[in-house]
Image (tube, grey):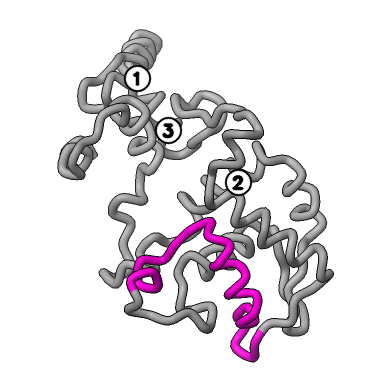
Amino acid sequence: MEENIEKHINKINQMATADFEGLSPIEMDNLLYNTFEKGSPVQLRKLSDEDYASIPILNQMLYFADIIQKAGEIKLTAKGYLPTKMVADLYYKGFLKDVMIETGINKLYKETDSNVVNLIRLLAELMSLTKKRNGKLSLTKAGEKIIQDKEKLLKLIFKTFGEKFKWAYYDGYGDNFIGQLGYGFTLLLLSKYGHKKRINFFYAAKY
């Protein structure tokens, strides 16, 4: 009896479900809790060097790491932020742009003036790419190693941004996980429907 029940449950868990865009409950579980890992329906493919060169956040992270590696260590401000010269260098390389700065609403001076610069430092810390010691920022041994592998670095950026960094940090709407929870499912939707431009409500309804 118990064996038959277990078989029935396993069968259900492996059945395609319309609400999950045709994924089975097992696949959905892997997508939610083991995004990009073996068994997940969403994987990051190995790309060409040309493709990696076109990914802004990856290249900003590499440039950030290169500055630190060449300097050996970076002296942070009294509050633990990047020095203003480095902030300007990172931002004006143009990997990522900040709307508030580009439209002239805000002026760039310190790290907290630009979310795209602040984000890179925070991600690097969450990824254990960098470490702080005595008010100075340097690369970790693991960081020195992973920046040599763009495929692994991009995957780590994705996972860290999706699972460790709180997206609500910048939006001003309080501490919640709406949108971030199940980000792998959103990536699946984009992969399936992203060939055509659609309004945000299309994806919100499926989420």
Q: Residue shown at 39%/60% (left/top)?
A: 167
Q: Residue shown at 32%/79% (left/top)?
A: 105
Distance between the alpha carbons at the discs numbered 3 and 2: 16 Å
Name the spot of residue 179 as percent of width and height, x first: 30, 50
Q: Mark 1 against mark 3, which lies toward the viewer?
A: 3
Q: Residue furthest bottom?
A: 78
Q: Mark 2 against mark 1, which lies toward the viewer?
A: 2
Q: Which mark is residue 13?
A: 1
Quick one: SS at disc 1?
helix
Residue 56 can be seen in this image: yes
Q: Earlier in the sequence, mark 1 or mark 3?
A: 1
Q: Earlier in the sequence, mark 3 or mark 2?
A: 3
Name the spot of residue 14 as percent of width and height, x first: 36, 15
Q: Residue shown at 46%/50% (left/top)?
A: 162
Provide the residue span drawn in magenta.
77-103
Q: Earlier in the sequence, mark 2 or mark 1?
A: 1
Quick one: SS at disc 3?
helix
List the residue tagged with mark 3.
31
